[in-house]
Amino acid sequence: MTILVTGGAGYIGGHMVLALLDAGQQPVILDNLSTGFRWNVPDGAKLIVGDFGDEALVSRIIAEHKIKAIAHFAAKIVVPESVADPLGYYLNNTVKARSLIDCAVQGGVKHFIFSSTASVYGDQGLEPVAEDAPFKPESPYGRSKLMVEWMLEDTARAHDFSYVALRYFNVAGGDPRGRMGQSTPGSTHLIKRAVQVALGQRPSLQIFGTDYPTPDGTCVRDYVQITDLINAHLLALDYLRAGGKSVVCNCGYGRGLSVRDVVSAVKRVSGIDFETIIAPRRPGDPAAYVAANDRIKAMLGWRAEHDDLDEIVAQALNWERRLHNRQSAES
């Protein structure tokens, strides 16, 4: 069965491609390479360079490659940027997703996996938030993703079409075999930035806000390791193929870690002390995101296998070193 992976040359989509190949399945990647990399595409996967909002192109890919399922990862994901450029986010994340979903329906694609976000919840407090919590997105990024969830829900009611939307919490780490990691130069991921500071690639690390209503005053997040996250997608694909009904699931460990917790882990694992600078809060950043994960365990049979912060940090460190060596060799 051939699966179309939008954004498959990037961080999360790229790990999905690896997992599909490891499972003996056939991925076709659609990526405009704005944040993905051609060299990130493993042998055995076909890359088509283009925009997932290009209806003619997507329709042709579905027909020519006999696409049976779509895993949709392509999106803009930087919360402060979405506050500054809301229309750009609504265009890329919502309007283009509408085109992709329409192509799926018209092309007879019955299964769709959507990369959603915990940002749909907004600031719910330190307790784990369940999927039926009220929506309070605090940024255009969160709203743009929530709109896609609504479109998928309505589409599934009207057509022979089913989906799983996975609401990610904070994705981190890399492939345990060292084949892939977070490679985007301007990434805002905390663990990546902290690792870069530890390795001397950045002069210091900014901590955005220390006056949040959390135990140490810094933001609290539920960090989920990338391989565990991608395993949820494979389970979702199996679930849909077996006739499962459309469902939305959180994907997180149910455990919150603060910015200071992460900084301490990077210093501990790297053995390097580094400077941190206190900065003002960023717009759109809630105090805490922690996942209630009972539904994904019950519905998809998902279990965490890499939920150790030191392991996650070590993967990020190892990948950053590999990435630096690669860039040095090319320069």
Image: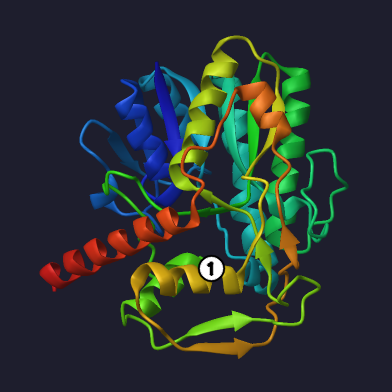
Who's the residue at 37% across and 74% down the image? Answer: 196
In the depicted view, which residue is nearer to us: 267 or 184?
A: 267
Figure label count: 1
x and y percentages locating residue 6 in the rendered image: 46, 40
Res 188 seen here: no
Q: How was the colour assigned to the protein in this rendering? A: rainbow
x and y percentages locating residue 81 in the rendered image: 61, 71
Q: Quadrant of residue 253?
A: top right
Give the vertical position of 232 relative to 158 (above or below). Answer: below
Give the vertical position of 88 relative to 107 (above or below). Answer: below
In the depicted view, which residue is nearer to us: 292 or 328?
A: 292
Element assignment for label 1: helix
Give the vertical position of 7 relative to 191 (above or below). Answer: above
Who's the residue at 66% across and 51% down the image? Answer: 255
Q: Residue furthest right?
A: 134
Q: Is residue 86 left or right of residue 70?
A: right
Who's the residue at 59% across and 81% down the image? Answer: 207
Q: Quadrant of residue 258?
A: bottom right
Residue density around tag 1, few if under 14, some if 14–19, many if 20 or more, within 10 Å: many
In the picture, the quarter occupied by the C terminus is bottom left
In the picture, the quarter occupied by the N terminus is top left
In the depicted view, which residue is nearer to us: 157 or 18?
A: 18
Q: Quadrant of residue 130?
A: top right
The residue type indicated by label 1 comes to Val
Look at mark 1 in the image and give the residue it sits on.
Answer: 262
x and y percentages locating residue 236 in the rendered image: 56, 25
Who's the residue at 68% across and 75% down the image? Answer: 218
Q: Is residue 100 left or right of residue 287?
A: left
Res 65 seen here: yes
x and y percentages locating residue 318 in the rendered image: 29, 60
